[in-house]
Amino acid sequence: MKTAAKKTYMRRSMTVLAGYFLTFSGTFWFVQHAHPTGLELYACAVLPFFPLFVVFALTAAYLKAERDEFSRELVMRCLLWGAGASLSVNLFVGFLRIFNWPGQAPPFLELFAFCGAVLLAKLTYKLSNPLPAE
Amino acid sequence: MGVYLPVYFATVFATSLYVQHHHPRGTALYVCAALPWLALCGGIASIAVYLYEERDGYSRDLAMRCLLWGATGAMATNSFLMYLRMFGWRGQAPALLEICVFAAAMLVARIAYSVSNRPECGRKEN
Amino acid sequence: MKNRLRELRAERGWSQAELADRLEVSRQSVNAIETGKYDPSLPLAFRLARLFAMGIEEIFEDG
């Protein structure tokens, strides 16, 4: 059963994510054709970043609005596991670069690590707290 | 944390020295990157253990919030840099920039919470 | 923290889902409290006490 705060959050963040895909596609298309440099390039990088920033803000608003403390703590724990995994990946790539690694990490690697870890944490908590049949 | 930080610094120092002299490639380079990384992962694990063991609910909640603010800062920085790179930016951000942003955001959050929960000045406690 | 939540719920013939609805929390929360894996906050403990029309100490046992 989803709480009211969770339902509101899901609805809003899905809308923003749809906006993100549109913004990202549009910006990517523009970059492929116009090949911007300097300030223009920075502006292009900021555009798809904005919807993501809004999702962060919505998540913070959800955590504030959620009245079910157990659900809120569970969400915070899952987010922290995700953050731990993302930072961990980022650190490893950072050390590789410090040690003159000539390669390039795949894009969105940290984001995949984050989402994967959040999902795994959620599954683990669900399995360790099974709901009895009623 | 008091154990992991000296281990981390020692590992970074030793590994950097080795890399400077031997210029490893391939698997050896990955192993060199993994050594200080493991030390830092130990630090991350120690935070997880602290959160598990902390009996004071308010302190734990505050720590989790600060960590989340730190994570938000780090992910925001990482996303921006990722889009820059994807769109053909040839520059190079300083290594470990995200972890610095993480630490700074955590510190700012901690200070903000401390300031907003400070005791009133001049008020005598009963 | 030990509690009599399951017993009190059964007396009234409520399922976990029904109790969760009345408290405006998730069924997961109710289950976690009943199994002693999670201690409710004060506001939730007071809501429980008001719902069952008894004191918090009659529902929860410290120790």
Image (spheres, coloured by chain):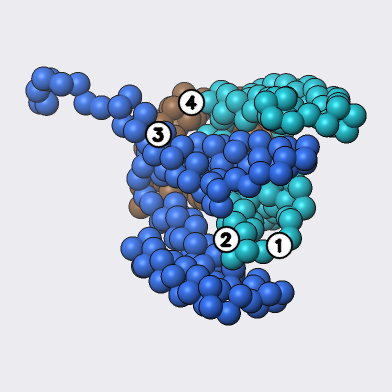
Look at 54% across and 52% down and name the residue there.
Answer: B96
In the displayed structure image, the side of residue A54 where residue A106 appears, left or right: right
Can you say which quadrant of the picture contains the C terminus of chain B? top left
Asked if labels 1 and 4 share a chain, the reply is no
Mark 1, residue position = A102
Q: Is residue B62 left or right of residue B96?
A: left
One can see residue C35 in this view:
no
Marks 4 and 3 sit apart, C-alpha to C-alpha, by 35 Å
Residue ID for mark 4: C47
Q: Nearer the viewer, mark 1 or mark 4?
A: 1
Q: What color is chain A drawn in? A: cyan
**Which chain does the numbered disc 3 sit on?**
B
Chain B's shade in the image? blue
What residue do we see at 60% from left, 25% from top? A57
Q: Residues within 10 Å of mark 4 (few under 14, many from 20)?
A: some
Q: Colour of chain C?
A: brown
Establish whether labels 2 and 1 are both on one chain.
yes
Q: Quadrant of the N terminus of chain B?
A: bottom left
State the residue at coordinates (71%, 62%): A102
- Measured along the vertical axis of the image, is residue A23 above or below residue B68? above
The mark lying in front, picked from 4 and 3, is 3
Front position in the image: B111 or B82: B82
Q: Which residue is mark 2?
A: A98
What amino acid does circle 1 point to? Pro
Crowd class of label 1 (few under 14; some 14 to 19; many from 20; radius 10 Å):
few
The answer for which chain carries disc 1 is A
Q: Which element carries disc 1, helix, strand or loop?
A: loop
Label 2–label 1 contact, CB within 8 A: no
